[in-house]
Image: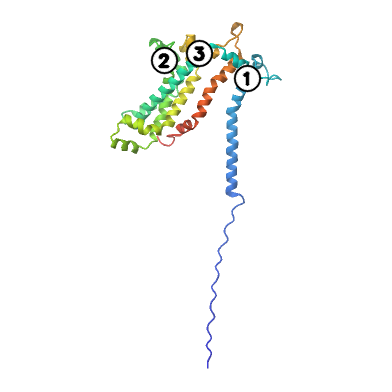
């Protein structure tokens, strides 16, 4: 009887996958750490650029006048509150703070309103020579008001707006309005027009759309225009000195210059340093409080428009 032998079964070959490529030691994590380190170092250096002058101003404000004008010596850190108390005791400083507050707040509000309306018109309403007019607005940004200060004074004098806080508000608004229009035009250009089309379909008018639909979206731009106008008018000196001759209407920068002591108009630099620090406080507080709106407003429309 014949024996049947079966053929041997073929053993399937084991497929070996290629080894995964080894990542470079510390590749992505190392790049992330390096970038984070560079960001921290760069941010620290940038912060020092702004904080060191503020710290020096605070130190100088606590020094006597003779120490401020002299070379640094062992009295450099002998600080006191004498200068701040002397400034606070000056009634013209408080009057200057009040006048500066009225002028700066009024300028910020008026600039924000006019810039919002003008920016909306430039961004949404097609009319003849729109590009030319907007180009003229941008050209005015390149002309410093000091170059046209004399004709401005003559014109305001004819209109009876010299020696008036209202005239100063109108002057500051005119100077700061081109930047506000530029920011608001770019802000409105970055908003999708479909939102307005939907509101038009629902029966909303242009003013209702601007107030109810677009206002929440353009708050960063409006805050930027208002903050820029406030800071510019709060610290402005030459225009206030030119258009105001009544000491009761002086703004804070002009009032600080008038803090003099001694004969022949000798300036007390200790009082000036302390007054400058006091004038700096509202600017720092407002900028820190509105920083996120300010950055977002400057960035709006950077790609579009």
**The residue tagged with tag 2: helix, strand or loop?**
helix
Q: Which residue lies furthest to the top in this view?
A: 263
Q: Name the residue under label 3.
A: 95
Quadrant of the frame with the C terminus = top left
- Residue depicted at x 40% and y 27%: 181
Q: Residue at x 61, y 49 (%)?
A: 26
Among numbered discs 2 and 1, the one appearing first in the sequence: 1
> x and y percent of residue 286 in the render?
50, 26
Query: How many residues crowd around disc 1 within 10 Å: few (fewer than 14), some, or many (20 or more)?
Result: many
Sequence-wise, the earlier of marks 1 and 3 is 1
**Residue 192 percent coordinates (x, y):** 37, 37
User: Is 221 situated above or below 17?
Assistant: above
Viewer-nearest of labels 3 and 2? 3
- Image check: 98 left or right of 34? left
Q: Disc 3 or 2, which lies upstream in sequence? A: 3
Q: Tell me which corner region of the image, top left, top right, bottom left or bottom right, holds residue 266.
A: top right
x 66%, y 14%: residue: 66
Question: Under tag 3, what secondary structure?
Answer: helix
Where, by quadrant of the figure, is residue 90 drawn?
Answer: top right
Q: Is residue 110 above or below residue 195?
A: above
Tell me, yes or no, whether the two marked residues, 2 and 1, touch with CB atoms within 8 Å: no
Residue position for label 1? 60
Which mark, by number, is residue 166? 2
Q: Closer to the camera, 239 or 78?
A: 78
Q: Which mark is residue 137?
A: none
3D distance between C-alphas at marks 3 and 2: 16 Å
Q: Residues within 10 Å of mark 2 (few under 14, many from 20)?
A: some
The spot of residue 62 in percent (x, y) is 63, 19
């Amino acid at each position: 009887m014949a024996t049947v032998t079966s053929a041997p079964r073929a053993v399937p070959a084991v497929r070996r996958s290629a080894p995964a490529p080894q990542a470079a030691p510390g590749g992505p994590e190392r790049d992330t750490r390096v970038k984070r380190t560079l960001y921290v170092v760069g941010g620290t250096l940038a912060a020092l650029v702004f904080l060191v002058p503020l710290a020096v101003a605070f130190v100088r404000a606590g020094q006597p006048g003779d120490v401020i004008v002299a070379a640094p010596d062992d009295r450099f850190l002998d600080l006191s509150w004498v200068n701040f108390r002397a400034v606070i005791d000056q009634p013209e400083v408080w009057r200057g703070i009040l006048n500066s507050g009225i002028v700066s707040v009024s300028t910020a509000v008026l600039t924000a309103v006019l810039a919002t309306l003008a920016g909306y018109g430039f961004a949404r309403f097609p009319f003849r020579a729109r590009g030319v007019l907007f180009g003229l607005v941008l050209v005015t940004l390149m002309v410093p008001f000091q170059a046209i200060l004399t004709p401005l004074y003559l014109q305001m004098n004819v209109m009876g707006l010299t020696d008036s806080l209202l005239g100063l508000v109108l002057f500051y608004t005119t100077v700061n309005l081109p930047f506000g229009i530029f920011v608001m035009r770019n802000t409105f250009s970055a908003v999708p027009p479909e939102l307005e089309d939907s509101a038009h379909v629902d029966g909303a008018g242009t003013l209702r759309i601007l107030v109810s639909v677009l206002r929440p979206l353009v708050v960063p731009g409006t805050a930027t225009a208002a903050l820029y106008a406030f800071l510019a008018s709060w610290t402005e000196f030459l225009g206030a000195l030119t258009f105001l001759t009544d000491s009761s209407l002086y703004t804070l920068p002009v009032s600080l210059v008038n803090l003099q002591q001694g004969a022949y108009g000798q300036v007390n630099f200790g009082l000036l340093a302390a007054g400058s620090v006091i004038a700096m406080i509202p600017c720092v507080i407002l900028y820190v409080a509105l920083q996120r709106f300010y950055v977002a407003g400057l960035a709006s429309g950077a790609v579009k428009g």
